[in-house]
Image: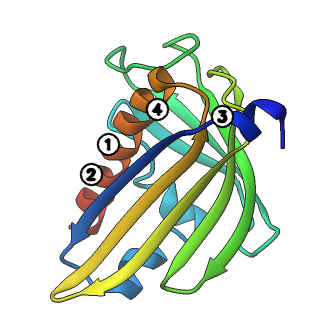
Amino acid sequence: MTIAAQTATEVVKLSHHYAFPCERVYSAWTKGEILGQWFGPHSHNCKVEKYDFHEGGDYQIRMVPVGEDHDCEGDPKADSVCAGTFVEIIPQQKIVMAFSWIENAADIGDTLLTIEFAAAGDGTDIVLTHERLPNEELRLAHTGGWQGTLECLEEYLS
C-alpha cells in the first residue's frame, strides 16, 4: 500500500435496492463476460480484460468513453483502466477488491472497494463502499461514477 493510501480518508458509500434475487444480483459481479455488459457509468462502455474471480485473483477493466459527457481525470477521449486483486469473497454476501487506476486517470493510489449483498424483502440490497480516496474532489467524482454503475446494473437486470 502506498503512503498516500495509508493517509487517505475519503469514503464513498452508496446503497441500492434491486427487485431481483440475491443470487442474480451477486452473479452479475462474478463473471467477467456478464460484468462487461453493464459495468461503469452511462458515459463509458466496459471491456473486461482480465477477471480471475477468486480470492487473490486479479482483474483489469478498460473503461471506454462513449461521449464527452463525463467528469473524470485524464483525457476524456481516451480509455481509462482500473485494476486490482480480489481480497475477500463471501458468496452472495460480500466482495472486497483492491482498486486502483493504472491508465489515464487520477493517481488515487491503492484503494479498497467493498460490495455487500443482502436479501431484502422482494429483492436485494447492495451497499458499495469505496475507501481510501485521497481527497474530496476524487470522492465526488467516484461517487458519480459508482452511482451510475449501480444504475447500469439495474438496467442490465431489468
Say few, some or many: other residues with alpha carbon within 10 Å of mark 1 (under 14 / 14 to 19 / 20 or more). Answer: some
Q: Which of the labelled discs sits on residue 148, or is there none?
A: 1
Mark 3 is surrounded, within 10 Å at the Cα level, by few (under 14), some (14 to 19) or many (20 or more) other residues, namely many
Residue 4 is left or right of residue 133, and the answer is right
Q: Secondary structure at mark 1?
A: helix
Q: Amino acid at mark 4?
A: Arg
Q: Identify the residue under disc 2.
A: 151
Q: CA distance from mark 4 to mark 3?
A: 18 Å
Q: Amino acid at mark 3?
A: Val
Pointer 4 or 3: first along the chain: 3
Q: Earlier in the sequence, mark 2 or mark 3?
A: 3
Q: Position of residue 89 (x, y in %)?
A: 65, 78
Residue 28 in view of the camera? no
Mark 2 residue crowding within 10 angstroms, few (<14) / some (14–19) / many (20+): some
- Give the number of the mark in front: 2 or 4: 4
121 above or below 51? below
Which residue lies under the disc numbered 4?
139
Label 3 SS: strand
Q: Camera-side residue: 74 or 77?
A: 74
**Disc 3: which residue:** 81
Secondary structure found at label 4: helix
